[in-house]
Image (tube, rainbow, N blue to C red):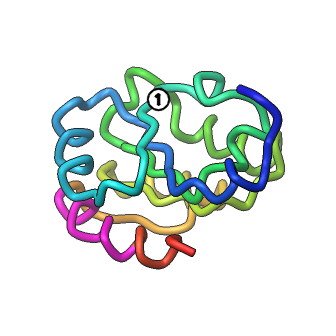
């Protein structure tokens, strides 16, 4: 990625961490055209600290843990990169959600609920 600029910071985009193509398609269908969704399975695919900082929020799928460790992702975001970017998780069981909470994930939703809640996130972070 290039150098961060004001124009790049103003781009409306978010990160989705999942390997589930179906949930990605459902979320994309719920998005207006002026938003971009970057689907990844590791933070390195996004870039370095300054690249991740350009995204408005991050969605993490807690049901596709075979492709990435969501707890490690949270540790990297909060203690490695020291980022306070909002992280919304969906799916997962109670034990994994508790572990994500301990590592400072922000909010948790059911798998189907994340699609209906996306509109409110886009409005809230649409500045």
Q: Quadrant of the N terminus?
A: top right
Residue 52 coordinates in the image, percent (x, y): 68, 42
Q: Could you tell me which residue is drawn at 37 percent across and 57 percent down?
A: 94
* Residue found at the very far front of the displayed protein: 7
Tell me where residue 35 appears, x and y as whole percent.
Answer: 41, 54
- Point 79% across, 47% down: residue: 5
Residue 70, horizontal then vertical, whole percent: 52, 38
The magenta span reads: 112-120
Secondary structure of the residue carrying tag 1 is: strand
In this picture, residue 127 sits left or right of residue 1: left
Q: Where is residue 32 in the image (x, y as percent from the top left)?
A: 29, 60
Quadrant of the rendered image containing residue 108 = bottom left
Q: Name the residue under label 1.
A: 40
Predominant SS along the magenta part:
helix
Q: In this view, does 7 lie to the left or right of 5?
A: left
In depth, the one of 29 and 81 nearer the eye is: 29
> Going 47% across and 60% down the picture, which residue do you hit?
88
11 left or right of 32 in image: right
Vertical position of residue 70 compared to residue 5: above or below: above
**In this rendering, would 54 be left or right of 67?**
right
Relative to 116, say whether 24 is above or below: above
Q: Which residue is painted at 61% across and 51% down in the image?
A: 55
Q: Is residue 124 magenta?
A: no
- Label 1: how many Cα within 10 Å (few below 14, some 14–19, many 20+): some
Q: Which of 66 and 2 is in front in this view?
A: 2
């Amino acid at each position: 990625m290039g150098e961060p600029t004001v124009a790049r910071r103003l781009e409306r985009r978010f990160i989705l961490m999942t390997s589930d193509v179906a949930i990605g398609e459902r979320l994309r269908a719920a998005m207006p055209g002026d938003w971009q969704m970057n689907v990844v399975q590791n933070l390195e695919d996004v870039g370095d600290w300054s690249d991740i900082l350009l995204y408005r929020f991050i969605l993490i799928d807690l049901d596709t843990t075979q492709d990435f460790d969501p707890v490690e992702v949270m540790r990297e975001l909060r203690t490695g990169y020291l980022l306070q970017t909002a992280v919304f998780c969906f799916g997962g069981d109670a034990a994994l959600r508790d572990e994500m909470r301990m590592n400072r994930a922000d909010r948790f939703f059911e798998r189907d609920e994340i699609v209906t809640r996306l509109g409110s996130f886009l409005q809230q972070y649409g500045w």
